[in-house]
Amino acid sequence: MSLAQPADLAVTNKKAALKGLYDALYEKNMFPFWATSEGVDHDEIKQLMATSKAIPFVWSYTDIEPLLQRAAELVTMDDSERRSLILVNPGLAPKRASVSTMYTAYRLNDPDEIMPPHKHSPSAIRFGLTGKGNFTGVEGEDVVFGPGDMVLTPNDAWHNHGTVGGEQAVNLSVLDLPLVETLHAVHFDHKYTEMVDGKEVEKKVQTARFPSDYSQRIYGEGGLMPRFVDHKRGGGLSSPMYVYRWEKMEASLDAHKDWDGDPHEGIVIDYVDPTTGGPVFRTINFYV
């Protein structure tokens, strides 16, 4: 029979003591933040890196479009006013996110469907895909948009969605919802009211307060900006230009098609806040 040497005994005793310490910490909902070479059970680097992460993934529109049509047949506006298909990254499921900070969804609206206004703390855009009658009303500016047009619905700006013109239309929604969720700052408001004859009245459709071409008329010429309008509408936390038309972007791309462009990205043009030259939102940048 051999006896444990003092050094071996010290190691054994330390392991037992550490296990007791770790068990006590976990029981009290705490985590030991120090490196250890004793196995992996309490390796804080491994545990910190073990959180869910988005993985490379491709969603095909050939898969999405038939499902949008089936949803339109089975889910009416009486069932739900927000009939969208959300892209869920397999690495983040069941979290509603395409990447860790961004939410993406496809929406098909049948002819002349208009949803009531709402607002929320996440910032969002709608990008027209099919049909000429996609509709978004943003803070009193009624925007009808088609393929390639991008419409902003800034955080806390009242807006509503739908279609006009008697045909189906599909658009893509992008929001910074997962980021705002991480910051515990999500809120939605569905009770839209306007003052009518001195009384606050709940309404299902926003009253237009701006011309339908307001964004292009005020902000559509680079280097020129009228001084006689309020550029802080919708809270002033995003671009006050609510619609970016595809023909403008396409013309700019075509004007530079013979340029070498960036050696890695080619010809890239940003959508910008015309009042600052920065991104349209403080949380997301968009470009073509």
Image (cartoon, grey):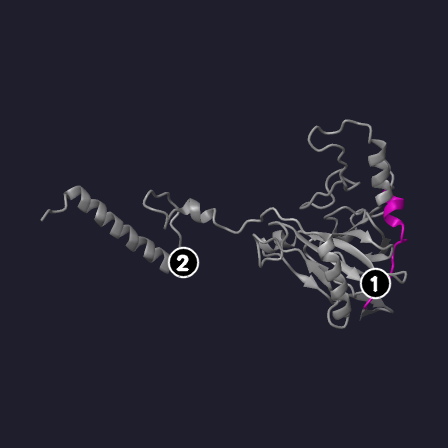
Q: Residue at x 68, y 56 (%)?
A: 121
Q: Residue at x 77, y 36 (%)?
A: 269
Q: Is residue 194 left or right of residue 9?
A: right
The residue stretch that appears in magenta: 204-219
Q: Residue at x 47, y 46 (%)?
A: 49
- Rendered view: 108 above or below 227: below
Disc tally is 2
Report the quarter where the C terminus lies: top right
Q: Residues within 10 Å of mark 1 (few under 14, many from 20)?
A: many
The front one of 218 and 144 is 144
Measured as percent of width and height from the top left, residue 90 is found at 58, 54
- Give residue 206's mark: 1
The front one of 218 and 226 is 218
What secondary structure predominates along the stretch shown in magenta? loop
- The answer to whether one can see residue 274 in this image is yes
What type is the residue that disc 1 sits on?
Gln
Q: Residues within 10 Å of mark 2 (few under 14, many from 20)?
A: few
Measured as percent of width and height from the top left, residue 181 is found at 60, 56
How far is disc 1 from disc 2 in space, using C-alphas? 49 Å
Q: Which residue is mark 2?
A: 29
| Disc on the earlier residue, 1 or 2 | 2
Direction top: furthest residue = 260
What type is the residue that disc 2 sits on?
Asn
Direction bottom: furthest residue = 78
Measured as percent of width and height from the top left, residue 167 is found at 87, 61
- Residue 134 covered by magenta stretch: no
SS at mark 2?
loop
- Give residue 172's mark: none
SS at mark 1?
loop
- Rendered view: 266 above or below 92: above
